[in-house]
Amino acid sequence: MKEVDIAVIGAGPAGLSAALACGKSGATTLLIDFMDAPGGQLIKQTHKFFGSERQFAGTRGIQIPSIFINQLSQMPNVQLVLGVNASGYYADSGVLTLEDGGKFIKVKAKRVIIATGAGEKALAFENNDLPGVYGAGAVQTLMNAYGVKPGNRVLMVGSGNIGLIVSYQLIQAHVQVVSLVEAAGRIGGYLVHAAKLRRAGVPILTSHTIVRAIGEETVRGAVVAQVDQSWQAVPGSQREVACDVICLAVGLTPLVDMMWQAGCEMKYVPALGGHVPVRDENMRASNPAVYVAGDAGGVEEASSAMISGEIAGISAAVSLGFRAQDADARLALLKSDLAAIRSAPAGEKIRAGIMSAMACGGER
């Protein structure tokens, strides 16, 4: 049985930030991830972040993990464990089970920060199982992590920030984005990203969706159609688009299996991507030993994930009696930064979703 003060599950932007905050406080910290390299979604984000310098404005996402790791490696009280899966949490005993190949490791942690991120949603349409139909995250991984072009002509489905950013990255990789379709009546992501696509000549079709993938062994085209206010295809609006890749950027859903296992109070909040844990403003769940950070608490941007991770890390450490320097002032600043990120018009749904997830939480 390995005993630590705090275990952080997930070494993406939220988990890295949480572990660093825990380490700075002096708490013995175990940072766990099933991948062989830390960073989560950051390892494929080649674009520069914008916003505050505190959230790495002007730095490319792929550069951020090494910044965290350089700092964590200098902390003897922090251990990073990669290639190991956190497979179970037992709420009655507070024991966390890790799976390392055929070996199981038990960890007794006084506090657990769950930063497991989110998974891609699929979309139901005819022939959606053809080779050539990808999630946007898979396309981004192929290009930015492995240098592999997914195809030559891509139809992008979804205009959230992921769809917009991946579309531009496809163009940078000399892949043609033949069109971007969005079922809603307006673009879902930041207009600054959409403007780049428009300048590159990519048609953005709002109130449109994919009806069918064309092909037998692989994708060779798609049928798109306009949709009405009831999300039904408008008769006579269908048309074919020649493409060899259909890229789905239709949202993410929080990965919260560990939260259920921990007996946390959960709430279905569509604006946050699905079921999320009820939490207080310090990211503490209804199980007082458990904190949530990043997309596991509701799908947002990497900057928000890093802020929520640091909030969770500081709060978990303080709850154990560790006093990070100027903890109260730092928490106030982080919460102000988070409110500023969510204050944009595009953050309206997020704000409402967060308020809903905190409705029964209160201060713990």
Image (spheres, rainbow, N blue to C red):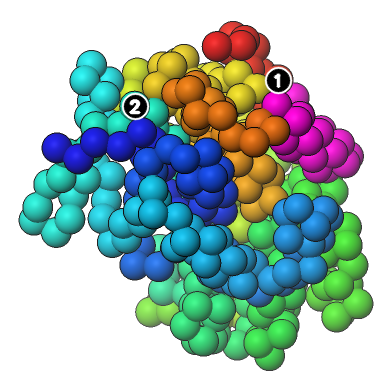
What is the secondary structure assignment of the residue under circle 2? strand
Does residue 25 show up magenta in the picture? no
The residue wearing badge 1 is 355
Could you tell which of marks 1 and 2 lies nearer the N-terminus? 2
- Give the residues in magenta: 328-353
Q: In which quarter of the image is residue 6?
A: top left
- Residue type at tag 1: Met
Q: In which quarter of the image is residue 222?
A: bottom right
Q: How far across and down, in percent of the image, does residue 256 sit?
A: 42, 35
Marker disc for residue 110: 2
In front of the other: 200 or 4: 4
Q: How far across and down, in percent of the image, does residue 189 sit?
A: 78, 53
- Residue 348 is left or right of residue 15, and the answer is right
Residue under the point 50% across and 78% down: 145
- Residue type at tag 2: Lys
Against 239, residue 15 (above or below) is above
Could you tell me which quadrant the N terminus lies in?
A: top left
